[in-house]
Amino acid sequence: MKDPVTLSTGVTYDRDSIEKWIEAGNFTCPLTNQVLRTLEPIPNHVIRKNIQDWCVENRSHGIERIPTPRVPATSMEVSDILSKIDVACKKQDGKGCRDLVVKIKSLAKESERNKRCIVSNGAGGVLSQAFQAFSMASSFDENDDVLEEILSALTLMFPLDVEAKGFLGSASAMQRLIWFLSSGDLSRRRNAVLGVKQLVSSSSDIPRKVNELSETEGAIEALFKLIKDPICPSSTKAALLIIYHTITSSSTKEKQVRKLVNLGIISLLLETSVDAERSICEKALGVLDGICESEEGRQKTCDNALSMPVLVKKILRVSDLATEFSVSVLWKLCKNGDMEDHRSVVLEALQVGAFQKLLLLLQVGCGEKTKEKVSEVLKMLNLHRNSNKIECVDPMDNFKDLKRPF
């Protein structure tokens, strides 16, 4: 035992062990089989002191003294703090609310057990409602300190439930989140993009949220900057995911694509994909696929020297999803455009070994939609293979690092 606690039946257990028992859905005492009157175990200080004394007595045998454990947060303690936050919001007491939020955040960071207790007592909803309440100020600079602290604490409560998302997705709260996206220190911008991601990635009302986002001045530029000058992998992934929803679900998606293309998103996505981790690479290729829905996006992608080498390289190298996006972009580039552009794209694809790579993909296997696109691209490539005699890429060089299942 490291942290002895006593149940309502009078039997003492190690806290970690008995909490795992209760979390598994057992509401009886393992020894007596009696139904527990309360699920909150009481610290047994006598036994803990005996254990520590024994450790001290036997330190000559290499036994280290077990440090006194922190008493974990209780449901009653958490509920009390959350009630006080609610009262502070109604009084518009920014300083009082901020101090209470700091306390909740500190408890959540102490242990996973505390965090579960805080979340299960509805902290996400209370904090989201508090963020909404303090975001209604007429000036963006007003209540900055308390809003920043609430948002920081909220990131520990993700994913949020429907009610919490309702508060955080209100008009005033959304405006403040977008303001935070483009202003303040790195931590605030990171927390803001994670908050927006919560609203647009799993909401049943995605189109409305991305419309609000895309119509707010400076939002797209702020998201672009988070990818260009990354803060951390989680903020980069969130920014890419939000942009993906913006260019696929927004009613002004064509306008947003044009804005992103002018910012230089295509070069940024290709450069990001070269050595990025799997999840970031998938999202970057997904955004590029969305960009290539537009004629302007396809043209700019064709004009970029990195496009074909990166797309062909990512097929069968990263993941099934990355392969699907790469094939989709390749298909759009080869299929669209005038005769001269089409021929130029096809010849470039042949030069970087696309024909061999796509043949291998058919052998390895892929989804039906991807297979149709692969077959169509292969037909287009095949028309130029023999006549131009430009296949100078050794197919085995492309596939030497591939783990083939056949």
Image (cartoon, grey):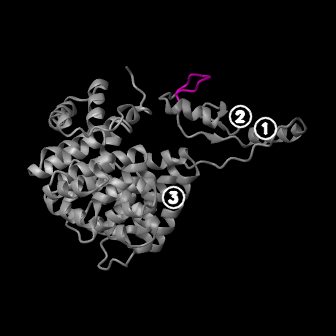
Q: Position of residue 237 (x, y in %)?
A: 37, 52
- Relative to 266, say whether 31 is above or below: above
What residue does disc 3 label?
105
Instruction: Tell whether label 3 touches label 1 (CB within 8 Å).
Output: no
Image coordinates of residue 85 in percent, x first then y, are 43, 63
Q: Residue furthest left?
A: 338
The image quarter containing residue 97 is: bottom left
Q: Secondary structure at mark 1?
A: helix
Q: Residue at x 41, y 74 (%)?
A: 144
Which residue is label 2 attached to?
Answer: 1
Give the mark nearer the N terminus: 2 vs 1.
Answer: 2
Q: Amino acid at mark 2?
A: Met
Label 1 is placed on what type of residue?
A: Ile
Residue beneath label 1, please? 51
Query: What's the magenta region?
Result: 28-36
Give the main secondary structure of the magenta stretch.
Answer: loop
CB-based contact (under 8 Å), mark 2 and mark 1: yes
